[in-house]
Image: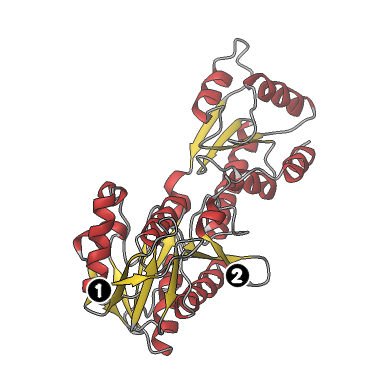
Amino acid sequence: MRFCFAHDQGMEARNVLCYRSGGAKRFQWCRRERGPVWRRLGFVDRMAVLTSGGDAPGMNAAIRAVVRVGTALGVEVVGVSMGYAGLLTGQMRVLDARTVGGILQHGGTILGTARSPEFESEEGRRKALENLVTRGVEGLIVIGGDGSLRGAHELHKLGFPVVGVPATIDNDIPGTQIAIGVDTALNTAIEAIDRIKDTASSHHRAFIVEVMGRHCGYLALMAGMAAGAEMVLLPEVETRVEAVVDELTRAYARGKLHFIVIAAEGSALKAHYLRDYLSELEDGAFEARLTVLGHVLRGGSPTAFDRILATRLGAAAVEELRQGNSDRLVTYGGSKSNSVDIMKALGDRCGVDMPLYRLANMLAK
């Protein structure tokens, strides 16, 4: 088994690393107009899988799919513990069908995840690459969000075959309609907001509920629509605190017994500031409470949708590597999985769906 990867350096011939089980060799490669380009010289015999960044419900289902589909196709699958940090320290073990038995319904990730500042350096990435090569790994599947997928792209640039699987509850990867973990996190948020609405109605209070979403307000917007919130605060839309007070006043004048604001953590109008502002108004008309859902949204048993999505994307990632593809992100487009270039998928920040935002405002009246 052998893979070759060529980096373009003008129009001159250059050296190419060819990775084999147990080591690497250098070969001369012909010049090409565009790159980098790598060429498959055979099917993958051994691939690795890791989870990185924030955990998301469904990651275990994706790991299970990679292992069982790979095994069924005659590929040995190696699990990397603790994300890119595990690549640097060589924390790898062979996974089989029994290893991943019984993990489908569990949140989190059996492989673990961790930050790795060392991997951000060129030296660190080369060390990770060396660990993969010396262990005979011929391809890598990375399950994670924006930062994790950018790390996968950097390994591809060094010559190693990689395929990404989107998993992040923020749903901030524009290249896919939805990422693993989003549906579960959304359902968790809605359940919590429904409970909060009960006590808000009883006490005639305003409640601000903060959900995750540093750069993308998808979770806040969808939770606001599904739970019937009066307002949503998003990173993509600037909202003045006076506008919230005006809407709150009108809502109470219409006879509403509660006022629910769903705020993404990255919104310009911060949830804690809004709570303090409402509570300190001179007339004392609005008693506001703040609930931060935070990391509770990352945990819990994945929904049926997330289990199926993760299974399909994990299986698709195995097929991408076996077909000789690299630097690809497997994606979901409504009825089928597909794949796109990783950096193309990450090229644009997610933007708010303005028609849905306007619809949410109309429904809140």
For the question of whether residue 139 can be seen, the reply is no
Closer to us: 219 or 282: 219
- In the rendered structure, the answer to whether residue 296 lies left or right of residue 87 reads right
Q: Nearer the viewer, residue 91 or 54?
A: 91
Label 1 is placed on what type of residue? Answer: Lys
> On the image, which quarter does residue 127 sit in?
bottom left
Asked if residue 214 is positioned above or below residue 320 in the image, the reply reads above
Q: Nearer the viewer, residue 11 or 286?
A: 11
Compute the Cα span from label 2 to label 1: 33 Å
Secondary structure beneath disc 1?
A: strand
Which residue does the image show at 59% across and 14% down from the upper left?
Answer: 281
**Residue 108 image point, x, y percent:** 39, 61
Label 1 crowding class (10 Å Cα cut-off): few <14, some 14-19, many 20+?
few
Give x and y (percent) for residue 227: 66, 47
Side of 216 where 40 appears, left or right: left
Mark 2 touches mark 1? (CB < 8 Å): no
The mark closer to the camera, 2 or 1, is 1
Q: Residue furthest top?
A: 282
Q: In x, y percent, where is residue 160?
A: 36, 67
Q: Assess disc 2: are there few (<14), some (14-19) or many (≥20) residues with their C-alpha within 10 Å of its C-alpha.
A: some
Instruction: Kindly identify the amino acid type of the residue bearing the numbered disc 2.
Output: Asn
Please tell me which residue is depicted at 53% across the width and 49% down the height of the picture.
170
Of the numbered discs in the image, which one, if any, rests on residue 338? Answer: 2
Task: Give the quadrant of the C terminus.
Answer: top right
Mark drawn on residue 25 = 1
Residue reaching furthest to the front: 12
| Residue 144 visible in the shown view | yes
Residue 333 falls in image quadrant = bottom right
